[in-house]
Amino acid sequence: MARHLVPVFSWLAGIAVAQQSLPAPAAGAVDYPSQIAPLLAEHCGRCHGAERQRNGLRLDRRAAILKGGRQGPAAVVGDSTQSLLVRKVAGMADGKVMPPEGALMTAAQLGLLRAWIDQGMAMPGADGPDDGTHWSYRAVRLPALPPVDDAAWCQQPLDRFVLHRLQREGLRPSPAAPRATWLRRVALDLCGLPPTPAEVAAFLADTAPDAYERQVDRLLALPSYGEQRAWRWLDLARYADSMGYEKDGLRRTMWRWRDQLIASWNEDVPFDRFTQEQLAGDLLRAATLEQQVATAFHRQTMNNTEGGTDNEEFRCAAVVDRVNTTMSVWMGSTMACAQCHDHKYDPFTQVEYYRLFAFFDQTEDADRDDEAPTLPAPTAAQQARAMAIAGERAAAVAELRADDAAVQAWAEAQRRVLSAFDAAAPVASTWQVLGPLAAADFDAAYATVWAPERGVTNDRLQEGLSWRPAPEFVDGRVHTWRGDNSAWYLYRTIASGAAASAVLSLGSDDAIKVWWNGKEVLAKKVGRAAGADQELLPVELTPGINTLLLKIVNGGGPGGFYFDLRRSTMPPELVATLMLPPDACDEAQRQQVRDAFRQTAPDLAPVRAKIAALDAELAALAGPAVPVMRELPADRRRTTRVHVRGSFLTQGEVVTPDVPSCWPPLGDRPRNRLGLAQWLCAPENPLTARVQVNRVWEELFGRGLVETVEDFGAQGDPPMHPELLDWLAAGFMTDWSMKRLLRTIVLSATYRQSSVVLPELLARDPYNRLLARAPALRLSGEALRDQALAVSGLLRERIGGPSVMPHQPDGVWLQMYSGDRWQTSPGDDRWRRSMYTFWRRTSPHPMLMVFDAPSREVCKTLRVRTNTPLQALASWNDPQFVEAAVALAARALREPGDDLPRLEAAFVRCLLRAPTERERDRLLLLVRDERRHFAANPAAATALVGPWTELAGPPPIELATFTVLANVLLSLDEFVTRG
Amino acid sequence: MDPIRERMRQLTRRWFLRDSSLALGGMALAADLLPTARPAVGPGRHHHPPRARNVIWLHMEGAPPTLDMFDRKPVLDRFDGKPCPDEFLQKERFAFIKGHPKLLGHRWGFQRRNRLGVEVIELLPHLAQVLDDCCLVKSMFTDQFNHAPAELMLLTGAPRPGRPSTGSWLSYGLGSENRNLPAFVVLMSGNLPSAGKSLWSPGFLPSVHQGVEFRTQGDPVPYLADPAGMDRAQRQRLLAAMSDLNRQHAATAGNPETDTRIAQYELAFAMQMSVPEATDLASEPAAIHELYGTTPGRTSLANNCLLARRLIERGVRFVHLFDSGWDIHGTGPGDDLMTQFPKKCRELDRPLAALLLDLRRRGLLDDTLVIWGGEFGRTPMNEERDGSRFFGRDHHPHCHAMLLAGGGIKAGAVIGATDELGYKIVESPIHVHDLQATVLHCLGLDHERLTFPFQGRDFRLTDVFGRVRPELLA
């Protein structure tokens, strides 16, 4: 190796000692994608990457390295000592060390770089010889099972990979967890709820060899399994009950998608079909209602309803979110980086980003305030009820009988009434008008009682207001005027020759009040444009002068009214038929009269009322209108262009839907969302299955096999157990069954290990990457609350339905633009599982936030697990937990006997094991102390348990004593942790 | 100085910061993310020696007409009521102004009460006297002309929700100095700002870095108070029992997280005392209440100014005050220059002057960076929305003034200038990203190196922009 005159520095990290040699090249084959690319990206990428090439040098392409920059070629293939890149990084060229800013390479890294150059600089992808692709872009192949020295330990084939690796490290797996611990673990993981003490006892007593299997099968068949899967999916789908952005208006129907999601998981819909339904259910042949509802997955994007915002800007933001979310959830790729420029580390160009954008650019939704398009989606229960109602309605309609004699008698009576009107020959005077009378607002204009309402003195000044005749207001036409927030009065007399019945046909813009002969007969506060027959008011004409006063109140825009005097509420054609002599009618006219009889005959009123009630119920069963994805018709399709630097205002070249070229081609699949969904789960797709099994692994082990669950690209971490990952992925791809995947993992010996952490193991493998034990994981806020509700007996396990509002501190929902209030749900809805808690993006429930819930504004593939004092405060003092403590206390006090069995019952309920003697003694001491305290302060006992009268029963001092015991139990580390 | 040794030292510093982010996925180190679980801030966490330890940022929500407050324009008075120059309207998009608006002269007089000779509106007599402690920046600008995006831009560096707030970045970068109080506290007087809680969101940072709203009604912190019927002694007994049981469990399970939890529970217990103590304004002497104009128990900017001082004293890193009502459009007496604006000035004048004075007297001003301002400026033209007869100004992103004072900031300086009508900057334009870079700099952090990896790249407060502005620094 060449010696150089210039002193260079040793590359032992952290120590700077003068030395005169390069570190030796690394031994063994070097892999560019996993070892060299991240190195160059981190240390050199800022100045010599895709975005910037200082001195003309670019280091992320092989040809570019060989071509070099202003100082000549950066590398000599096969000779790292002569490569400028190495010498610069080593500080051996012109005395300067590269990079000038940021971390220097360590000796080991420089050794790797040297080895890579010495070995021929293989760089797959862009322009290098294709001797390897980034690991995650290689097709998934089922790996052979490695040899192990303890096959008996293995419960599942996957255990061989783990054990093989442990053997290499000279480690042994941990012993199996106690059975009760495993059952609690698997129940919380699969269903999000702990087992009951009875279930634990049954399992402990079950000595059959397949006892574990049967427990898993039991859990996978529970409806709560689907809830738990769905809840996991909600963070990815950025599910919320509000639209986000500044106004954050409420989305009151999105729960319907959540219901569909729960059902999908419970049916174990294969993940490839599930993918098609979530992304493109509307495009499936003969798409069912449920498949269309599933597409609301991508309607969870935020919607900006602030006035003056550009809908196209926020439509584009939603499409961008769909691209990023799809690539993150399915492909584990950070495509978002390519929105403004070519990806700096992964081989995606900006043009390719907009090709993906083009898949999602053809749906009807456009950030409209009404969230169109929406789909009325009745639930299964609503659909069943609607079917039943259809039957009841048909039966009721059959009851509307019309026999000839009754019809004749009715027709005769009608004729008399109509004739009386003709005989009375009413004559209306010209309208007198008074207005507009302005008020502060619409409500005030409607409510203010101006002089005419206290009695009209026509043709005179009334309290400073004066009437004027309005001959232009002829009957049977809509008349309009201007004047925001103002009232108009219209007055006329109607002279009648005799007593008769008549009907006023009225229309108004907006609100209307009507006085007939001085008596108020209508008051209707509405906002609408005026039209004929909006109101049909039957009135009695008295002989002589009748008076009519209208008050029309306008909010904004044009105001106006409509008036006509009718003989009857019946349509004119029917009236004409009724006036004919009976024998002059043809069959059609007789049928017309029969139909009218059915609609109006008093005897049939109860049947009609029943039909009307059924119709109203049917209308209410239309179901929530769920925002869905719907493809634009052919004549309205958008032309997608690149958004230069990510700005929707700067449109670049036209692009059509396609997938990035570093991945397998789309082939002859349709170039729409459905084709993309098919491609995502195609056998040749290298990522989807790996990403899904990795996320499941993260869920069960607290850390993914690929730790960067959101990034399988060059910047992500390579997998610790690549064969295990592929074995799981290949298996998942055979049937895409999530239940089978979970079953395989939770029955493995790896999963069954104890979570006890031995100090030497902790020192050796603090993050448990080698899987020599099971992890202890702090439960999510949702699971913690659900567990507290479950052990206290409060939990109400109803599946699905609209979101609910359990207790939340006052004042959390302070929104500028909205009168929406958080109102604690009535009845037992406040004890539903936390996944149903109403989710407002600007203000998620504070307890969940304290436990690291995301805001759900965008997709989040990983929740961190922090450990903060605010969490302690929540589990001690959140009324939701206090209520659970009272309920748990009441439950314990129902046990026969004295303190000991009661205390043990509560303990077992929470921790699913008997207390140790020390634990028991400590808690007994607490119970005795607190009983003495409450006995001396009975008011304190009442104050503590008093708010929860629903749960009361035992004497307050006893209940309070056990409540503080329960408060301790519900906060124990063992309780808040899944061990 | 040995440059290589220095480089290596920097390198370890950087790795220190980066390590804390890498611990994200795991349980074992999760506790390390917690400012409360760390020792108080050490020099290893700074990129360079800090000039300030704490920040008090008073955000005037709605954007005050700083033109009328700190940037007197005699020419504007001369052309009062005349149509504005045509070039003001070219390629310009206003929030509300329609047609060809008229110039609007100042409606209030000015005074000179400081050595600086800066003319300050007559409505701020107390503040005018402490201006010598401040750096008045007349040439701030932003890219956004609506409240929510402009607030997000100012405080999170990007105009859409989802990025961490400045206080969250500081909590992440430096942690808290008080184990019993959060690192980042939010105090509000008036309505929630337009951009809502996104303004103190941790974005993609761990949630522990979220700004904690100290509410003035009910518990200052969620779930702080024990349930009715439980007293301190009882909570302490419960805590002792919990700790005993948790310790027994820790001995068998060996999970280091259990030890952290035991510590956090003890911390929670301490917070139940320290937060009410810190927020107890009634314990301040009468002279202080006189100085600030405070009334304990009320929700006011004055109370929040005093509370901010108390929190800073106790080691809270970043106190963010939000005061609403500054959106002076002139659509009615509730938002005009003649009625609403003087009311807001009165509410501001004495408390802000008192805060600066009080901090200086206590020797806290050297360590505390005080920032005052809104999200953008207001037009020199009268808005006259729908023919309104009330005087007011529309949103104006091209220039506004801000006040900086304390830790690391040049006192008694006036930076930048606007044109003779106050429409555009003519000297030293300072973008909000520059302000953010400079704030971090004062706290000993390099805005290009305080990063967090998310969605495949390293994010920072200043996005990909911003530079430290030496002219602002002492």
Image (cartoon, grey):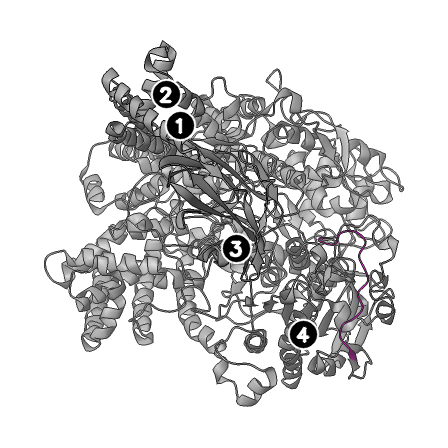
Of the two numbered discs 3 and 2 on the same chain, state the one appearing first in sequence. 3
The correct choice, above or below, for B50 with respect to B396 in the image is below
The correct choice, above or below, for A883 with respect to A220 in the image is below
How crowded is the residue under tag 4: few (<14 C-alpha within 10 Å), some, or many (20+)?
some
Type of amino acid at the residue the image marks with label 4: Pro
As helix, strand or loop, the secondary structure at mark 1 comes to loop
Residue B102 highlighted magenta (yes or no)? yes
Residue shown at 62%/76% (left/top)? B347
Q: Which residue is mark 1?
A: A570
As helix, strand or loop, the secondary structure at mark 4 comes to helix
Q: Is the residue under label 1 in contact with that under label 2 (CB below 8 Å)?
A: yes
One can see residue A378 in this view: no
Label 1, label 3: how far apart the Cα atoms are: 34 Å
* Disc number placed over residue A578 in the picture, else none: 2
Type of amino acid at the residue the image marks with label 3: Ala
One can see residue B288 in this view: yes
Of the two numbered discs 2 and 1 on the same chain, state the one appearing first in sequence. 1
Left or right: B354 in relation to A882: right
Q: Which residue is mark 4?
A: B342
Give the chain of mark 2.
Answer: A
A629 or B390, which lies in front? B390
Type of amino acid at the residue the image marks with label 2: Leu
Label 2, label 1: how far apart the Cα atoms are: 10 Å
Give the chain of mark 3.
Answer: A
Type of amino acid at the residue the image marks with label 1: Met
Label 2, label 4: how far apart the Cα atoms are: 75 Å
The correct choice, above or below, for A747 with respect to A667 in the image is below
